[in-house]
Amino acid sequence: MVIGVNTRLLQKNKLEGIGWFTYETLIRITKNHPEHQFIFFFDRPFDASFIFEKNVKGVVLPPPTRHVLIFIPWFEIQITRALKKYKVDVFLSPDGHLSLSTEVKSVAVIHDLNFLHLPQYLPPIVRRYYNYFFPKFAKKATQIATVSEYTKQDIVKSYNINPEKITVAHNGCNDKYKPISIDEQSAVKQEFTNGKEYFLFIGLIIPRKNLITLLQAFDVYKKQTGNDTLLVVIGEKKWWDNAHETTFQAMQYKADVKFMGRLNPEVLSKLLASALALTYVPVFEGFGIPILEAFSAGTPVIAGNVTSMPEVAGDAALLVNPLDKNEIAEKMKRISEDENLRQELITKGLKRRKAFSWDNTANKLWEAVEKAFNE
């Protein structure tokens, strides 16, 4: 068959959560199925490294989709025409957006419905777009894939979708994340934090990632302990608004917060493997890949007890109410003072990590493609 794929999020050195999902699944699917032809639809000139196999053809469909208003003509005109031109049998969209103007069978990967539950965290035009179109995409899709059982049930309840139409394909994580030696950890700390211990935040700085509460919790933790531990923040300041700035400026210990922006996986993996713990407390998450990355790196995890995070973490993390700064601070204090607890969490995390892999993700996604083709 001919599979057309929305690969607009495959952008060199700019891969985020859904971009990594796209990359890791497609690099495996195209290799595992040389008998099929794949047409990758990009919205701008693409890097040759994304043409994974000989059975992949890259096609540029301008303009770049840098604004939601451009999504509509791109999917409804450009994608619709391309599906017809290349005689596509199944259209796979790893970010969930579909063409409503085509009869070509489709698989939409819907990672979460945060825009439905937390519309206040999005610009008005963005939330209107998502809340208008995604119910239509969910109904239009021949098959849906999603990354957690939580999101599957959310789609079923919110959009009245038959659960048999939805395949759960849990995320995996990059193989670069693994434990490193004590000497390597010391060298990393010496290079990045002047030898000091640190908690780590990973993620785009947007409201639902809840950095504001984490900053407040870190201040509480510092007041309680008086130690020299830092909070290292890794992620692009996508939405550093007045609320973030006001919270940060009000901190007593803001000098102990280190912002490092976006990092490549090689550097990030070393920083994660050397951290006291990952502090990952979003108020809403479709999966939470950093949890798996921390498990793989042999790093303890403090995670939110809401949405999909308990499903991913199992019993291998300390779960907290993400809106309770005092509870988060208390868990930070426990991890920094109880080495036995840290080692217990590391052991459980390394075991839990084995339940997830990108190979499994790719296989599950391919099942959804085959189901769509055979309907």
Image: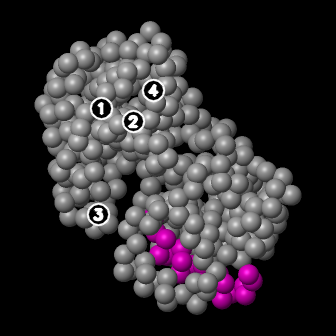
Quarter of the figure with residue 149: top left
The crowd level at tag 1 (other Cα within 10 Å; few <14, some 14-19, many 20+) is: some
Where 271 sits versus 333, above or below?
above
Nearer-N-terminus badge (3/1): 1
Where 65 sits versus 3, above or below?
below
Nearer-N-terminus badge (2/3): 2
The crowd level at tag 4 (other Cα within 10 Å; few <14, some 14-19, many 20+) is: some
| Amino acid type shown at disc 4 | Ile
- Residue at numbered disc 3: 122
Q: Residue at x 46, y 48 (%)?
A: 14
| Amino acid type shown at disc 1 | Val
| Amino acid type shown at disc 2 | Phe
> Where are the magenta residues, as a range?
209-228
Cα distance in 3D space between marks 2 and 3: 28 Å
Coordinates of residue 40 in the picture (x, y in percent): 35, 27
Q: Which mark is residue 110?
A: none
- Image quadrant occupied by the C terminus: top left
Where 251 sits versus 80, above or below?
below
Coordinates of residue 164 in the picture (x, y in percent): 34, 29
- Residue at numbered disc 2: 46
- Residue at numbered disc 1: 60
